[in-house]
Image: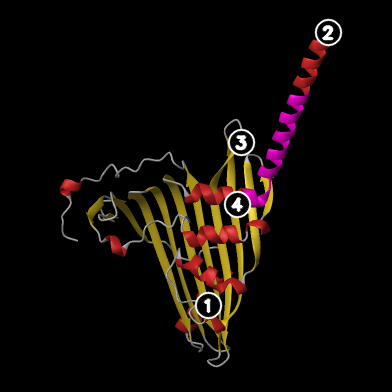
Amino acid sequence: MECEIIMKNKRFLALALLVLMLCVALASCGNKPESNVKSYVKSIGEAKNLEYTIKIYRKNHMYNDKEQIFRSETKARQGKIQLDPLSYSEFYVDGDSKYDYFGGTGEYALADKRRIEEALTTYGSSDSLFNKDKYYAPNDKELYKASSDYKSGKWNWKVADPKEHTVPEIGNKEAVLKLYEKYADKFVRTEKNDYVFLEFKGDVTKDIDDIKKLQGSFVKSNLYKEKSLVKSIDIKITLVMKKEGSFGKLIPCEAIISTDTKLESTKENWKMNNEDHFEIYYKNINDTEVKPFSDFDKSKIETKK
């Protein structure tokens, strides 16, 4: 009888040890950056709905020994989106800057030169965001826009053209997710409290076609039209995941992508630096319901665009 009990205890201990070893092995696999990146891609790629905050800005500086041309644009979006069928509601703000310096010492010329210098040394976006609107799309065929009346402070709704307003760039397009996967084994993983940070940075000039597709997922641009002019492309990607639940399941909550591209034309005597910055924050993935704004009343909106 004692032998039988001892044998049962040994089998139990062996089984418990095996389970413990499997748990350790699984935890070890789950802590690998490549595994985390693939999990991130799967979660965002399969998301059906979510809340988002998006910030996109660009800085473009073209120059030679005598002249400078500076262009920048910024947009920020915050809202909720359902992907299939499409519907979303959001707050939207944007702004841009245009400065030209063609030499000279006049007051206006020097003012633009100073503005260019200030914009280039400003960390992040250098634009003032004046245009503020609300959008509601109940489906992919309808879009409504509300602009704020400066005097009354009320939002005035009207019918808008879906073709004139891009669907929120939430970083779920194939070009973006495939780029994460392409560099998955090069990410570095760190942890802080309940957050896991995955970071990759490096020279990706040889992957210019992939970077062109990445950029096209967020903005319209001809930056990479003449590949021979591109001298270098540096990228930095930071993906953030939060541990949730008793088992610490990792859920995507943030993506930041920055590219720094340098171009040069010796024939036309100019150089160019271009900075693209794409920042996306996620909440309530697959637990978000899109509703119209409380002041939206379709019956009171004129059908004329």
User: What residue appears at the point 47 percent right and 55 percent down from the top-left corner?
Assistant: 172
Looking at marks 2 and 1 on the same chain, the residue that comes earlier in the sequence is marked by 2
Residue 213, image x, y percentages: 49, 68
The amino acid type of the residue labelled 2 equals: Glu
Find numbered disc 3 in the image and state the secondary structure of the residue it sits on: loop
Query: From the viewer's perspective, is the residue at label 2 or at label 1 nearer?
Result: 2
Q: Do the residues labelled 4 and 3 touch (CB within 8 Å)?
A: no
Is 102 placed above or below 253 here?
below
Query: From the viewer's perspective, is the residue at label 2 or at label 3 nearer?
Result: 2
User: What residue appears at the point 41 percent right and 54 percent down from the top-left corner?
Assistant: 77
In the image, which residues are magenta?
A: 14-35
Looking at marks 4 and 3 on the same chain, the residue that comes earlier in the sequence is marked by 4
| Label placed on residue 2 | 2
> Gap between marks 2 and 3, in whole Å?
42 Å
Residue with the mark numbered 4: 37
Find numbered disc 1 in the image and state the secondary structure of the residue it sits on: strand
| Label placed on residue 61 | 1
> Gap between marks 2 and 1, in whole Å?
84 Å
Looking at marks 1 and 3 on the same chain, the residue that comes earlier in the sequence is marked by 1
The amino acid type of the residue labelled 4 equals: Val
| Label placed on residue 228 | none
> 10 Å neighbourhood of mark 2: few (<14), some, or many (≥20)?
few
Residue 57, image x, y percentages: 48, 64
Query: From the viewer's perspective, is the residue at label 4 or at label 1 nearer?
Result: 4
Is 55 in the magenta? no
Find numbered disc 4 in the image and state the secondary structure of the residue it sits on: helix
Side (left or right) of 140 relative to 214? left
Query: From the viewer's perspective, is the residue at label 4 or at label 3 nearer?
Result: 4
The amino acid type of the residue labelled 3 equals: Gly
